Image (spheres, rainbow, N blue to C red):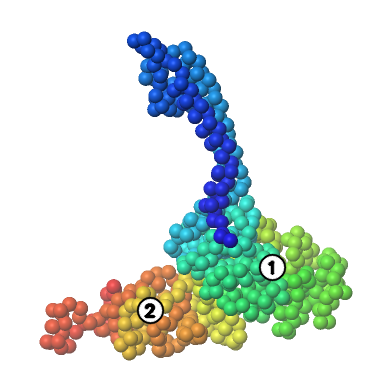
Amino acid sequence: MTTTSDLDRVGMILLRYMRRPLFVLLFVYSVGIIGMVLMPGRVVDGETTHMDLFHAFYFFTYTATTTGFGELPNGFSDEQRLWTIFCLYTGAIAWFYAIGSLINLVQNPHFIQSMDGFRFARKVRRNAEPFVILCGFGDAGSLLARGLSDHRMRAVILDVDPERIKALGVRDYTVAMPGLCADASAPKHLLAAGVEHPACRALVTLTNDDDTNLKIAVMSRHLNPRLRVICRSTSTRHGATLRALDNVTVVDPFLIFAQLLYWVIARSELHNLNAWFVGAPGVTLGAPLRVPQGEWILCGFGRMGHRIHRCLHDHGIGVRVIDPCERSDETDTEGDPVLAQADHSALEAAGIGDAAGIVAAMNRDADNLSTLLSVNELNPDVFRIVRQNSHENQVVFDAARTDLVLQHSLTTARRILKLLISPLIQELIDWLAQREPTRTEALVARLQAAVGDEPPHLWSVRLNPDEAPAVTRLLSEEGVVTPGALCRDARYFSQALPCEMLAIRREGQSIMLPDADFPLEAGDELLFCGVQAAELMLQATLHNPYTLHYVLTGVDPPRGYVFRWLADRFGGRCRGNTSNSRHPRT
């Protein structure tokens, strides 16, 4: 059975709704034209005249639309005028009927949906820029789309809620982001979104239903096995199934939330570095949060609460659990007390007076905000971390007296954005999490010296003929290029660019924080962090062989034929500039 395209569906609906009006118009025109031909005209020279087919068609065309140009080609007889009156009324009625049917057609939801699908598929098909398919446009999807727009990366959006798709029309994105109101788990909609398009870089599933996310991931893997899939999942069973699939990355927002919470409590320097990398507002590099040590109170023991409790307990942090849903008999907290109803009495029984901090991690913002009010009355000095569920309540959480607000949709969007834009940065953070805090502190000191107070700018470079022709040519000639040389300022040989090389990806292996004299190879993917101007200056080194030679040797060789001849003839007296050069390179 052949598949039906959106254009076929548009044509089918158009014919179904306009078939009868077209037949009516055809019938009225046929009767009117034939009648005008048969009606006797005026008698001229003793002979009765008749209108020919061409003039009858011409006359009826403007008469049926109530447009009058007079009696053509000659004056009419009474019989012709009587027939004209009949044609005028029948033609106007037929046109009103046809126009009404057309208005009905354009208001038909099936026709609108088919037209939207056709236009959407055409936009995707004509797109030549790299893009990401985003399935689900809730809080996390909207935040991710904003992040992609800030990095000038396109996205194609699918969502079942028409109001969310309508909201795309009022977003001030820097790049085009077409959207379609459709079920993303349907293969035809994935195909329309460009799952097989050569410019598609990844597919991200962010719906609120884990079953739907699993279905979308499985469908896309069958439709395009080479396409990278990033899937949101809070289910342990679904997560295990997805991790078994090739080229599928599972993002668990509850696990990310628990990880960030542990970093805040026990690895504040790592949390500060990660927040600085993602551009969190109000974060200053090298100024981590000061969190007191001791036992914590966890309010809420749902799926997120389980993840938080397990993470903190595994790292030796004492946790007292308050479960407002009264599930204390159904949950295992490994010896920690579980109390019911997060009110004043429950907080006092859990020891709010001597606790180091409290985590309000319930799935309703009203409950979390209510808990904060109780905590502020009982112990205003305790460290307060609160979970924000809905992005719409941002204003209230900003006004609340709290030390840290963690929004799981925002943390999910930031994690996925790092995987799409700079996947090596997340590998670096995970690598630092397994090392001593001194490694993180040393990196922070290097970044502070390189970047200063400027916001971080992350970018990646692949050593290939397209992105780094000068470096690739030198490496093919068995030359040596090191991170220290690449990060040297081509204007002043003795100074470094305001950037740091953070990681190298080579043949599927990652090398974190390489030394300044580490030899680079063709095909390496390099991750840099610095100010935005440093990327432009580094591009000159990567593309210009003279600039590359200068940062490697400190010598600016003669470029023209005459200067090279003079250098060969007179030797050192006509050599190029040395490392004392103070003029900018190009």
> Residue at left 55%, top 44%?
14
Q: Nearer the viewer, mark 2 or mark 1?
A: 1
What is the crowding at mark 2: few (fewer than 14 residues within 10 Å), some, or many (at least 20)?
Answer: some
Q: Is residue 78 left or right of residue 372?
A: left
Question: Can residue 157 be seen here?
Answer: no
Q: Is residue 103 above or below residue 583?
A: above
Callout 1: SS: helix
Q: Is residue 513 left or right of residue 400?
A: left
Write down the residue under mark 2. Answer: 464
Label 1 is placed on what type of residue?
Asp
Could you tell whether 307 is left or right of 173 in the image? right
If you read the primary sequence from the N terminus, does the residue marked by circle 2 or circle 1 appear first? 1
In the displayed structure, would residue 379 be above or below residue 559?
above
Mark 2–mark 1 Cα distance, whole angstroms, equals 40 Å
The image position of residue 329, as x and y in percent, is 88, 74
Coordinates of residue 495 in the picture (x, y in percent): 36, 80
Mark 2: amino acid: Asn
Where residue 339 appears, as percent x and y from the top left, is 85, 72
Q: Residue at x 61, y 56 (%)?
A: 182
Kindly tell me whether residue 184 is visible in this rendering.
Answer: yes
Q: Nearer the viewer, residue 80 or 9?
A: 80
The numbered disc on residue 210 is: 1
